[in-house]
Amino acid sequence: MGDQVKVYRSVGDIPVEPTGDLLTDGWLPGTWVVWSPSAPTFPGVMATVDRSNGTENLIAGFLQTGPQHNQPVIELSDMWTTDTRQVPGGDTHADWSSFDAGGSFVFDSNKQLQRMGSRVVSMHFWPPALARFYCFETLSYSERHGGGGGALTYTEGDRLYISENGLLTNEQETLANNWTELVVIDVANDIEGDSLLIGTVLPV
């Protein structure tokens, strides 16, 4: 009879298996996900996840890896733009995060597996204490749906929500979208592009 209790880091990352529209539509780094009831199909995966639409109570965290976004282009998956995330001649694989959907292995500096095609990806637990995101909503919900809402502007102190696409946004798209307890700490631009430095705060 065992009495072992396994305690994983409360803020850290685990290998998860994407399901649902993550596999058909792909994802960007920083895409927020929810726990999925599907059983993992790949050994070593701790759970399955699906894209969050910002309204669920099962938010698990965000996927840390996706396409590269370096300029000039270094990898095929660098070939996307900030509006469409895809350009003619770019990487057309469904998951946007690998050269193929099965066998592309990506390891971190500690030689830990971060991604294997679209089968395994590293997910960071929610909420992070501090993180910089390069992929987030740049257009309002209305603008994305043809309503002419315009571009989003981020400023320090903005509360952050999760959009219908699973990306951070400072717009509460529906009354069902709960605040993530994350705020914008800094808005910056560097060689990688526009970014948000986000941090966790206690709800008031």
Image: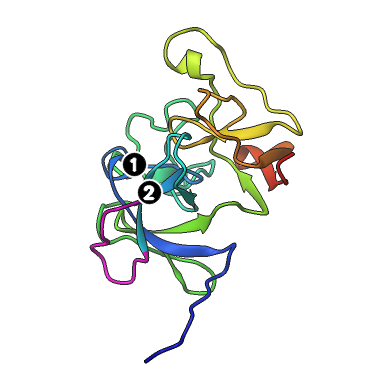
Residue bounds of the magenta highlight = 36-46
The answer for how far apart the CA atoms under marks 2 and 1 are is 7 Å
Residue 130 vertical position relative to residue 188 in the rendered view, above or below: below
- Sequence-wise, which precedes: disc 2 or disc 1? 1
**Kind of residue at badge 1:** Gly
Taking 131 as reference, is 28 left or right? Answer: left
**Kind of residue at badge 2:** Ser
Q: Nearer the viewer, mark 2 or mark 1?
A: 1
Pick the front one: 15 or 86 = 15
Circles 2 and 1: CB atoms closer than 8 Å: yes
Taking 42 as reference, is 1 left or right? Answer: right
Looking at the rendering, which quadrant does residue 16 occupy? bottom left
Does residue 68 appear in the picture of this structure?
A: yes
Residue ID for mark 2: 97
Looking at the rendering, which quadrant does residue 188 occupy? top right
Residue ID for mark 1: 26
